[in-house]
Amino acid sequence: MTWDYAPAPESRAIANLKPSYRMFLDGEFVEGSGEPLKTINPATEEVLAEVSTASASDVDRAVKVAKRAQDKVWGPMSGAERAKYIFRIARMMAERSRELAVLESLDNGKPIRESRDVDVPTAAAHFFYHAGWADKLDYAGYGPNPRPLGVAGQVIPWNFPLLMAAWKIAPALACGNTVVLKPAETTPLTALVLAEIIQQAELPPGVVNILPGAGDVGAELVNHPGVNKIAFTGSTEVGKIIQKSLAGTRKKLTLELGGKAANIVFDDAPLDQAVEGIVNGIFFNQGHVCCAGSRLLVQESIAEELLEKLHKRVSTLRIGDPLDKNTDVGAINSRDQLTKIQDLVATGEAEGAVRWTSACPLPEKGFFFAPTVFAGVSQAMRIAREEIFGPVLSVLTFRTPDEAIAKANNTPYGLSAGIWTEKGSRILWAANQLRAGVVWANTFNRFDPTAPFGGYQESGFGREGGRTGLEAYLDV
Amino acid sequence: MAASTTTTSGSPPEFADATRDETSLRRFLHGLPGVDQVGVEQRAAGLATRSIKKASKMWAIDMAISMVDLTTLEGADTAGKVRTLCAKARRPEPERPEVPHVAAVCVYPDMVETAVAEVAGTGVGVASVATAFPSGRSSLRIKIADTEYAVEAGATEIDMVIDRGAFLSGRYGQVFDEIQTIKRACGDAHLKVILETGELATYDNVRRASWLALLAGGDFIKTSTGKVSPAATLPVTHVMLQAVHDWHAVTGELRGVKPAGGIRTTKDAIRYLVAVQEVAGPQWLDPHLFRFGASSLLNDLLMQRRTQLDGFYSGPDYVTVD
């Protein structure tokens, strides 16, 4: 007797998908002079829409109109007035949340449950939160009347397309900056619907400009002399290139890069919830999360029991159609990313780690990868050191708390970490020892606009969110 | 508890050490991994977003009907009321004989005889609350007598309450002994152990009480009497489902779970069934291993069943109100 859940797909029509999308420049949707790109649905490999991209001259124009808007309108405007616009954007996002969620799942491949319950509400929350700051910057702890920086050039990744746009745009606007944003090549659609919302909210032309394109557009933007601040979220590799190219300029920079977070489970942890946290840490968003808990560090005395529970739990994850409301793990965002995951997994096997992969059925079409757990991983293996950015967990063990911390910190990254123990004093001790920008205790992958987010070392610098996050957009 | 533990009928060999004496029992229960409140509530809320449609919904409705312990536990109960309840239990929807009968009726001990006569030969069980339900505040002698009274009258299932006072003051041995004693008094009747989770207050306590009841030989662990608020909740049921799952993993024995009180709608019931499937396992989707203690739930299940078949909602005038 089995109970199979009938397919419960969200209607694709809700996404209001259009055959073509154009870039948003100076308050209008215009044809870019770059080569148009085709964005596909990674779950089916079908083309969703054609999107115009920016050329060098478009970038130049965008920066100029952003500069004009900053000088003439947005900069001089009172904080209370700016707040009204930002609140309006937040409200309109919330009103169109279903449309945004479905579109996000189509373009990115993430399950609708997640875009509906996490991405879109959190994105709107970032606008709500920062709207509140716009007229209170005097009290943010940066002295009286802190000034904006000017034009912010922002380049965002494909893993949380709308949410990352919100993370970038909301604080920039609250602080009085104007924005030129480049969404990721494979996921430009929700940012362009956000542009539509921004247009309907009657934000003055030029305050926000959204220019789709590939890395070359990002490079143009980063290197444009008219830009005062660069905010980049993406790979450590590209982050390094950006930092090099900005050296010697007066541009302010924040980078939010890769990670290889340790999720540390002590022997006195609440085991069943630790299992949930591990699953949420690495399989949330197909593991396409820079702060994913991709290294599980478990105390040897409970390793066997925990792994058994983990395998059982991971076996219940449902992989498939991202639009099905019961899907837990959706599609890998691109063929390139899928290949990268497959390569690293092959390396793990070759290096002698013990692979366990969920027996869940995978769809025939599209880019999918079954949740995978490697046991017997040692620090020396590539799967313990390199960011896989996929649904692949590496399990290592430790014997003592000091060893756990040493292993957790033994990485060039330092974005996030998790601690699982029922002992409060151990949480505080471990949190102080861990070199990571975000430390979660007895939970993982929780995001809130009030909490600053950012990394150590090769995970980048600067913080986004909270009072601390304002610093990145103020001349302090 | 020294006397009774020499004859630990309930504890399998894996746990012989745990139940050796009061100290061992305490050590065992306090050695169970904690339950993180935020985590278990998040997981329960996450699973509650499963969308169950079409054939899978129809299947769930019929399964839920067959899992109902149709309950009346009122001071105002009469033989007439119990007879009506039994008629409903036997054939929940007179015009549609294909609707399954419920698992059992659940009544006070003095109503068992009436109920037994009404459901004889139908496959519907008769469950009786016992042991000074709902508070459990009486002597062991009276609790045994209460149980025997119900069993002799023909009850096939006994829903006992634990002594929450003893549990909360840490006298686990006393609770253990009492469950074992009642289990013996049950004879062939199945024993459901009501933890009254609303009074235990923490998830750690719910987990400990669940294991205590399983160790002592309870066939089912049940959330609530229905007389205390909060009664059954999804996260509490998650903790209990996890306990029977873990029990099975160690001993190979299958024990059941019964949330009771506050489950009134089909939507709620389906959320519980999703938890059964995904937390305990598909094996537990069986009236022998999962029950709903409910009264008004049944009519909502019947109305939703009609809606599934007819394509429109007909409302409460089309099901029998008893």
Image (cartoon, coloured by chain):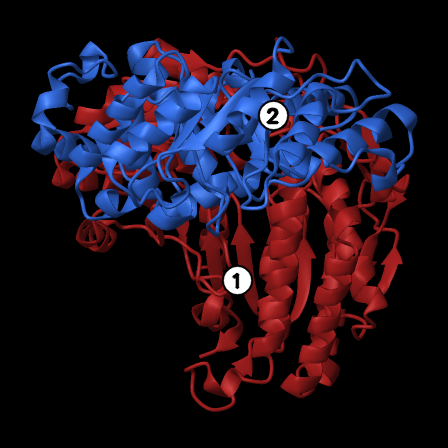
Residue in the picture at 47% in, 91% down: A144
Question: How many other residues sit within 10 Å of disc 2, few (<14), some (14-19) or many (≥20)?
Answer: few
Locate residue A218 relative to residue A395 in the image: left or right: right
Locate residue A307 relative to residue A211 in the image: left or right: left
- Dot 1 or dot 2: first in sequence order is 2
Locate the N terminus of chain A by quadrant: top right
Identify the disc placed on residue A336. Answer: 2
Residue A434 location, x and y as percent? 25, 49
Query: Mark 1 highlights which residue?
Result: A449
Against A68, residue A366 (above or below) is above
Q: CA distance from mark 1 to mark 2?
A: 31 Å
Q: Is residue A8 visible?
A: yes
- Residue type at tag 2: Asp
Nearest to the observer: residue A181 or residue A62: A181
Locate the C terminus of chain A by quadrant: bottom left
Residue B74 location, x and y as percent? 55, 44
* Chain letter tied to red: A
* Chain letter tied to blue: B
Nearest to the observer: residue A104 or residue A328: A328
